[in-house]
Image: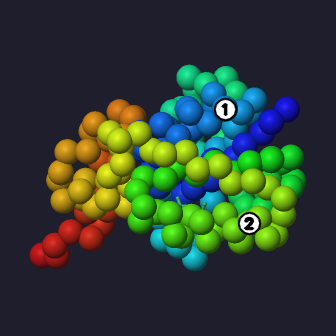
Amino acid sequence: MRRAVCPGSFDPVTHGHLDIVGRAAQLFDEVVVAVGVNSSKKRLFTPEERMAMLERACRPWDNVRVDSFGGLLTDFCRDHDVQAIVKGLRAVSDFDYELQMAQMNASLTDVETVFVPTSPEWSFLASSLVKEVASFGGDVSGLVPDFVHEALSARLGERDGQTGPGP
Ligand code: PNS
């Protein structure tokens, strides 16, 4: 059984992430999409919300499951018998940091990192940009699944309600 992990923050999942997950699902027997939980980072969605959105978005693939991890990714790989880390590369600008992480992870364990080039239609896509554009009222409906778009609009609406202009 060849098992891979697609790790990320997924705050929230985008079509760019799903492009990589779907292609990893064709390359490996099983793919674990693992939500990195880092309580020191401020996120729009809780880990449970991010996992629930991923579970729904990954339903089309029977060999994909969703999990979460807190510590080192290499520890997660060891504990879940994962042989490969799959990362999407959108552009050369991703490469420096991803190479550094792949080499650090290789120094900690024998897990292999496999880079998959992002499909050109999603090469500009990042969760952080989706959130920024949506927060200013831009249309991001084509960049995330419909139910993610609804959750994003609702969460940003709640947030604006809390931090909106005072009296
Ligand atoms: O979606 P992101 O924010 O690019 O995901 C980054 C993530 C979660 C994959 C990365 O930060 C990670 O692997 N964190 C786990 C902690 C760890 O193993 N750090 C050492 C990496 S060399």
Image x and y of residue 157, in percent = 27, 54
Mark drawn on residue 3: none
Residues at marks 1 and 2, CA–CA distance in whole angstroms: 21 Å
Q: Which residue extends farthest left?
A: 167
Q: Nearer the viewer, residue 135 or 93?
A: 93
In the depicted structure, whether residue 33 falls above or below residue 26: below
Q: Residue 54: which quarter of the image? A: top right
Q: Nearer the viewer, residue 129 or 48?
A: 129
The amino acid type, in three-letter code, at marker 1 is Leu
Badge 1 density bin: few <14, some 14–19, many ≥20, Cα 10 Å = few
Mark drawn on residue 105: 2
In the depicted structure, whether residue 32 falls above or below residue 97: above
Q: Is residue 158 left or right of residue 96?
A: left
Which residue sits at x=51%, y=33%? Answer: 57
Mark drawn on residue 27: 1
Badge 2 density bin: few <14, some 14–19, many ≥20, Cα 10 Å = some
Image x and y of residue 165, in percent = 16, 73
Is residue 68 among the parts visible in the rendering? no
Q: Nearer the viewer, residue 7 or 138?
A: 7
Q: Secondary structure at mark 1?
A: helix
The amino acid type, in three-letter code, at marker 2 is Asn
Image x and y of residue 12, in percent = 45, 50
Which residue sits at x=72%, y=43%? Answer: 4
Q: Is residue 60 left or right of residue 94?
A: right
Task: Give the quadrant of the C terminus.
Answer: bottom left
Task: Give the quadrant of the N terminus.
Answer: top right
Q: Residue 14: which quarter of the image? A: top left
Question: Mark 2 vs ligand 1: CB under 8 Å?
Answer: yes
